[in-house]
Image (cartoon, coloured by chain):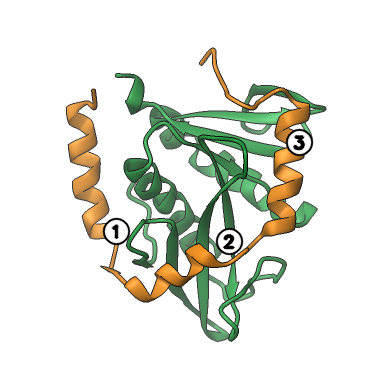
Amino acid sequence: MKSKSVTTEKTKMVGFINKVDPSLDKYQEMDLFKEKIAEVKEILIKAGVSKVTNH
Amino acid sequence: MNHPCYQPNVSSDYTTYEFDSVGKNGICTHLIKYSPIPELDGFYNLGFGKKLDDHNIDDQYINDNGDRDLILATVVKSVYAFSEQYANQYIIFRGSTESRTRLYRMLLNIYFNSLSKDFYIWGIVNNTRIPFEPDSAHNYDLFIVLRKYWLF
């Protein structure tokens, strides 16, 4: 369950965003940073961080 | 976090942020992109760089527009905005170069006091996850942050 402070922070974020621009949705389909993401994945797996627990 | 920053446009799913860096060398459009890491549920990679004409991103360029602090504050704000939409998702920072990783480390050092109130922050050092320590001598491979509020 989210806390009341989340609502406060969301209000701040409304001011941070200029506008929602659907033309940026095209980046969902692009393989940006593909090699870097593969490296990141390897590092996480080596470190046993496939799911972080024990905060 | 009340540092001045740019106000980006955002994609409908809040994974892509676009803003113009305005400085001594003119206007340079930047993109911040959160990409899911394949086969690791709950992990998103934060990519960041200069927008190219072919809609790709150059994440190795060196910004020399004199507005580094504004850009870093914008990246931090995007972390807040993304984590509101994607609760319980881990965000990974890793530079494309050693200097870019140092930049991310600098970002975490500068904003540690405010970020640590709202996020868990870890680093990976020698294949081991440890809590991030600002201004430590650790040579971090990458950084992991997780919004705290989802546990409340």
Chain assignment, label 2: B
- In the image, residue A24 above or below residue A38: below
Question: Toward which corner of the image does residue A15 lie, by quadrant?
Answer: bottom left
Give x and y (percent) for residue B69: 51, 60
- Horizontal side of B28 relative to B99 (left or right) equals left
Residue B70 appears in the picture as rendered: yes
In this rendering, which labeled residue sits more in front, label 1 or label 2? 2
Q: Looking at the picture, do discs 2 and 3 lie on one chain? A: no
Rendered residue at 72%/67% (across/down): B60
Residue lying furthest top: A54
The residue carrying mark 2 is B48
Identified by mark 3, the residue type is Ile
Give x and y (percent) for residue A14: 22, 56
User: In the image shown, does B12 or A14 lie closer to the viewer?
Assistant: B12
Give x and y (percent) for residue A41: 70, 40
Rendered residue at 52%/72% (across/down): B30
- Horizontal side of A47 relative to B71 (left or right) equals right
- Could you tell me which secondary element the residue under label 1 belongs to? helix
Work out whether mark 1 precedes mark 3 in sequence or the reverse, and give the earlier one: 1
User: In the image shown, does A5 or B138 lie closer to the viewer?
Assistant: A5
- In the image, residue A30 above or below residue B51: above
Question: Where the N terminus of chain B falls, by quadrant?
Answer: top left
